[in-house]
Image (cartoon, grey):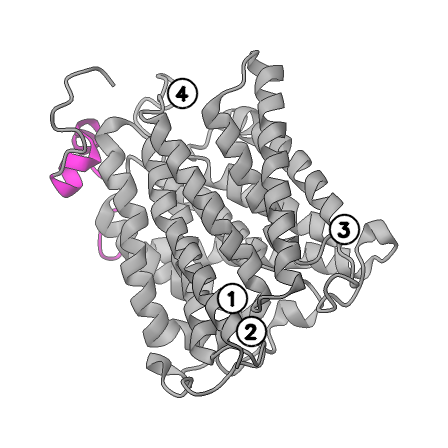
Amino acid sequence: MNSGDIGFMLICSALVLLMTPGLAFFYGGLVRRKNVVNTMMTSVFVIGIAAIMWALFGYSLAFGNDHFGIIGDFSWLGLQGIEGSTTDYVSTIPHLEFAIFQMMFAIITPALITGAVAGRMKFKALFLFIILWSVIVYYPMAHMVWGLGGFLAKIGSIDFAGGNVVHISSGVSALVLCIVLGKRKDYLRVQYHVHNIPFVVLGASLLLFGWFGFNAGSALQANELAVHAFMTTGLSAAAGMLSWMGMDVWMSGKPTLVGSVTGMVVGLVAITPGAGYVPIWASIIIGLVGSPICYLMISKVKQKLGYDDALDAFGCHGIGGIWGGIATGLFTQTSINDVARWNGLFFGDTQLFIAQIISIVVTIAVAIIGTLICIAIVRCFTTLRVSKQEEQKGLDISEHQENAYPSFNGLD
């Protein structure tokens, strides 16, 4: 055991947990005033349910003894049997600390989905969906990518901090769920205005702060690799912000604050799978390229296809995660992290790039099939969507009987 590593990982775990309240502010600021409580609630409640599930059986299913390269077992139910030992991944921190760090990923990931369905999904249905999705999609994905004997790890694909496990899986699931749920009332017929830009900036700032724990902490030790991941994370976020600002000026003539922080988040998403594998210079390219891809997906492709991803969970996390996984296959160097078996395509090897494409395709398939199964089960107990009258009134009142701004007399 190393006290420095233990302290470092506890701080990183706390930083990652901070990301979920940050997401609540980020999403909450983007929606209409009448839905801000509901939107923030859909992020915050996940802290409770995901943490309890993780401790009872989630960690065991994700990191327990391998079955078919897809799922673990129930050997660590209730986290019994892990205290007083270390993990197979690193010997300088307690096994329980590794479980704590991974628990924070299990919390933030399903919360990302909720942005796609803001303003129209029944809270009861979403509550059940998150429980089912964690079991059917998240735990198997975590095992396949990070678990000992996991299928995607065996084929040589790499994912430093959750490109597949966190962003692609949640982003694709968000797309499927919002398509099945249907569009918001008057979507594409009226403009939906951001109701609180300072909330958006506060949320994005908390996400940025927490993301350094998210990526640097994935080194699992306070070492040179953690420092490398910290720097690639910051540079990709900075490049993503500048790139989005450039797209704003090019497309609309003026840079926007909401766009700037969105670009920053896209840069963070894109670097996540490769933060501990790609050279520092490559992280700038990853952020610079990622923002225009996501910008065009949100501003052009979404309107063309007509689906209602309310807060662009798929446009940012799904597309950003896919680009990040591909970029990891392009720019990885084994000299940075020997967990990678091969260099990226940019350095002459093809095996890693192929493995990355396979892992992305598998993740998309698991997310689509798993989400459809979750939706079918939820529909056995409740309808997915609130009524037209409840949507018109706003979900803050209809679902929670709360008003975020009770003394507000202005216009939305």
Q: Is residue 390 magenta?
A: yes
Q: Is residue 157 above or below residue 178?
A: below
**Position in image of residue 357 (x %, y %):** 70, 54
User: To which residue does mark 2 refer?
Assistant: 147
Q: Are marks 2 and 1 in contact (CB under 8 Å)?
A: yes
Give the left or right position of residue 151, taking residue 114 as reference.
right
Q: Residues within 10 Å of mark 3 (few under 14, many from 20)?
A: many
Q: Nearer the viewer, mark 2 or mark 4?
A: 2
Q: Nearer the viewer, mark 3 or mark 2?
A: 3
Regarding residue 183, the answer to whether it shows in the image is no
Label 2's element? loop
Q: Earlier in the sequence, mark 3 or mark 1?
A: 1
Q: Nearer the viewer, mark 1 or mark 4?
A: 1
User: To which residue does mark 3 refer?
Assistant: 331
Mark 1–mark 4 Cα distance, whole angstroms, equals 37 Å
The magenta segment is 378-401
Mark 4–mark 3 Cα distance, whole angstroms, equals 39 Å
Look at label 1 and name its amino acid: Ala
Regarding residue 294, the answer to whether it shows in the image is yes
